[in-house]
Image (tube, rainbow, N blue to C red):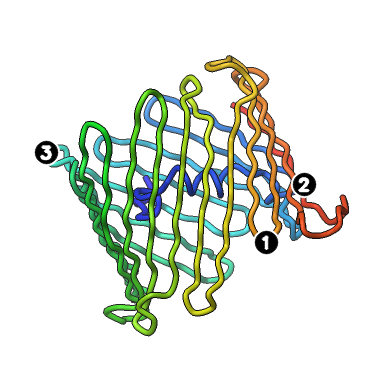
Amino acid sequence: MPALKFEKLLCGPSVDLLKRDFVHENNWEVEHTDSAKGSNFTNNLYLHRNGHMVGSTCIKADVGPVNAELKMQNNGDHYIDMSVVNPHYPAMKVLSKYAFNVTKGTNTYEVAAEHVHPMNTSQIKILPFARNYSAFSLFNYKRECCQVFCGTEVFGNHGSVFSNYALGLGYKREKDGRSYLVSARLFGDKVDLAKSLVGNLYAGAAHGCAQNAMSVALEHEFKTAQTKLAFGGLWHLTVPDHPTPSYVKGKCDTDGQIALTLFQRFNKNLAAAIGVEFNGKESVNPAAARYGFKLFLS
């Protein structure tokens, strides 16, 4: 199981809505998944925009308290990810990941420890070969009506005790099938203590076991006084809990970039998505747009 991320814990739904599941990143992709008790297999084959064909196989398995993940790609990039939980103290988890490329002769290794408590989630991660580390602590104050988050993350690169940091605040509320999330993160380093500010807003309404949702992200650079806004949304075209759901997902930003993805499930074993990205500030030119298609098999 991959290590936890400070950003995902603080404002994961907003980040995912704006960054994940847009299929225009590749010309086309086929994904096949299969699962059995205690194991999961995922095979991907896609044509990248640079013209390279990439194929990969990912295997995940649980053996007692150990969770293991192995991924191999035809371009030589491979990794092994393992995590162990003490059955007598499940709040603590130890993780390690080794990534390597035999052809290029590169390799990286990281080890992490996580502690998850109802009121606090903490992690320390060390990359000994690169002499880098990161650590975060996020407090969670939960009431019947809402949750309040507060935490910080620090980084040290190339043997430095302190390179940069992030401070985060968040507020989450769930009521009557609706969820709301507001968060803000302040970034800085040892030269500029206040470098940028990133804010996220998320609102979702229950649609069966899924959600119709919208998200707004704001990024402000203090030195250049430049502000960038991004908007995203997801809307289901079928009724809640439909056996073959369909939805459309889109995003746009103040740079003029617009992306749309249409997803359609045909049966329990087959689904597909088609997407496009273009710049709305430029004249509409179909040749300049980026198109993508993804087929899901299970």
For label 1, the residue is: 255
User: Which label's residue is closer to the chain start, 3 or 1?
Assistant: 3
Question: Taking 112 as reference, is 165 above or below it?
Answer: below
* Of marks 1 and 2, the one in the foreground: 1
Label 1 secondary element? loop
Across and down, in percent, residue 93 comes to 23, 48
Disc 3 residue type? His
For image coordinates 52% across by 44% down, the residue present is: 215
* Of marks 3 and 1, the one in the foreground: 1
Q: Is residue 297 left or right of residue 274?
A: left
Q: Residue furthest bottom?
A: 191
Across and down, in percent, residue 12 comes to 42, 46
For label 2, the residue is: 291
* Of marks 3 and 2, the one in the foreground: 2
For image coordinates 81% across by 60% down, the residue present is: 282
Disc 1 residue type? Asp
Q: CA distance from mark 1 to mark 2?
A: 19 Å
For label 3, the residue is: 88
